Image (tube, coloured by chain):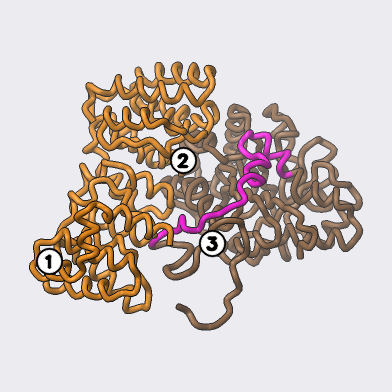
Amino acid sequence: MNTLNMKFIDPHIHMTSRTTDDYAAMQKAGIVAIIEPAFWLGQPRTELGSFKDYYSSLIGWERFRASQFGIKHYCTIGLNSKEANNEALAEEVMDLLPMFICKEGVVGVGEIGYDDQTAAEDKYYRLQLDLAKEANLPVQIHTPHRDKKAGTIRSMDVALEHKLDPGMVIVDHNNEETVRDVLDRGFWAAFTIYPNTKMGNERMVEIVKQYGAERIIVNSAADWGISDPLAVPKTASLMLERGISLDDIHKVCYQNALDSFGQSGQMKESDWLENTTIDQREKFSDNSILRGGQTPMVGEIRMNPAFESNIVK
Amino acid sequence: MDSKLLPTITAFLEHLLSQYTTADAVQWLKEKQQTVSTSETGKELYLPFSAAPRYVGKKSLNLSIEDLEQSNKLRKGFNPANWTTDQLARTILLLSLPHEDGDKYSQFILKLFGTADMGELVALYSALLLLPHPEKFVAQATEGIRTNMGNVYEAIALNNPYPFEHFSDAAWNQMVLKTIFVGKSLNKIYGLDERSNYDLARMLSDYAHERWAAGRTVTPELWRPVGPYINEYIIQDIKRLFNSTNETEQEAAALACAQSTYPAAQTLLEEHPLLKHKITEGQLNWSHVSQKAVTT
């Protein structure tokens, strides 16, 4: 894979749920930068403090962890739609968000939108659209799994009603049924290559053949479920095999993510082009990435050597 | 930090910053200092504190010897050699907050700690030595030592007199041990020799035994806080070092003995006249050992 030394961005991946093996493999496959949207952890949160600590880990520990593998980590911060249904907690989270959305490396408000399309979800989606507008940040919209088409259209209608510029809004988890509406209205259309529930990458190839590469973005949304953190490079590979031009692949697997989220002023190509060294001596103790005795990598980024034997020293 | 000195310190930091950033950025900071200085709730501090890099950049300072001497003169142990422009701006903002009421002041600053990102944490911990009511932040700094982010750890533990002045022995000992554990140089710990103690010497010796049992090495720097506490047990470690094929380990053994009044340690040093001579002549000290330890 990645014989052409292409560079990729995965603009939607939940690294908090992934392992260091994933980071190493992603780096090897050419992923240079990632965006981690704040999302639901699988287990509902019941206290404000767990939101605060989660946001802190996205801008702190997880970013640091990624840097140890030569990957630049950005995030979007927001209250996800599922947890917007706990109204008492959602109120508190809304007070907390201004403390986080202007931090360094926060490239948008997200992922926000609808899940069951309840009144509470609608209320907090709108409040966060206003917040993003006030901070002049891009918005990353999660479109619902159920009743997707209506939910996607409603997400866009409400964004326009709140006077957001569609060029500042990335509509995520599209499929064949939603893509035309999203592109026709001037929004960015992101696609998630995720086994069984979202897009397969063969279908993705067909979408690019049909709609071209303008404003189309590919991501993995890899998380705590059965998912693939290499979905973006694998899809690029398949596109190449099936005759999509290099230029178009570069757009949907790199440039469009940079152009859309780069509008935050917090994500520049120079962030990774000029920082191609890592120093794993920046390693750490009880939660260390490198356990005592592993050889740290220092200098030009390269892959971890494969484990050559079963002996652990 | 004596709060009477704050205006002088702030003026000095402003002078440093003006050399590394634009007039617009200086102006932006001036305005923010103004609003922060009359803040009732601390709220006015939070946004500019976060946003500082967007206005003043993140340039490394390239300070002159004079500037560094002046830093140390204004505040003993203050060494901003590795500081960046955003760090300066953030520190200036922290010093602009009303501080007559220590409880209120520390509450605002601790709230910042609670949602800080890595760059903000570095700025906050490095600034502790300049803040009024420093005793209010001991628990936070002790907690900070538990971090697993390299640069945040360095901001507290290295080139910073705050732990030396405020940490309990237990916290101090953990910090020294962890500095070795994460492969950073003891040479940069402010006040290392003054705060060495028997418990620390025992922990370090135990740690060496653990490493040796696993067939691993330990940095020769480890023996620096041990020297003054050589006893019937630790002397065995020192003998082992003298018998090492590694020259730096032998040097560490000699230096440790030179710090000790334990008779057997004195005897051991006599048995290594060349090393003893080097120490007496000032050709060998712990800084040399640190330098070698870092480069190997």
Is label 1 in a helix, a strand or a loop?
helix
Left or right relative to B209: residue A51:
right
Q: Which residues are magenta?
A: A257-285
Mark 3: few/some/many CA within 10 Å (<14, 14-19, 20+): some
The residue carrying mark 2 is B119
The residue carrying mark 1 is B266
Q: Earlier in the sequence, mark 1 or mark 2?
A: 2
Q: State the CA–CA distance, disc 3 to disc 2.
A: 23 Å
Q: Amino acid at mark 2?
A: Gly
Vertical relation: B44 (above or below) A22: above
Q: Amino acid at mark 3?
A: Met
Letter of the chain shown orange in the rendering: B
Mark 1: few/some/many CA within 10 Å (<14, 14-19, 20+): some
Left or right relative to A182: residue B267:
left
The residue located at (33%, 22%) in the rendering is B40
Letter of the chain shown brown in the rendering: A
Residue B171 image point, x, y percent: 24, 53
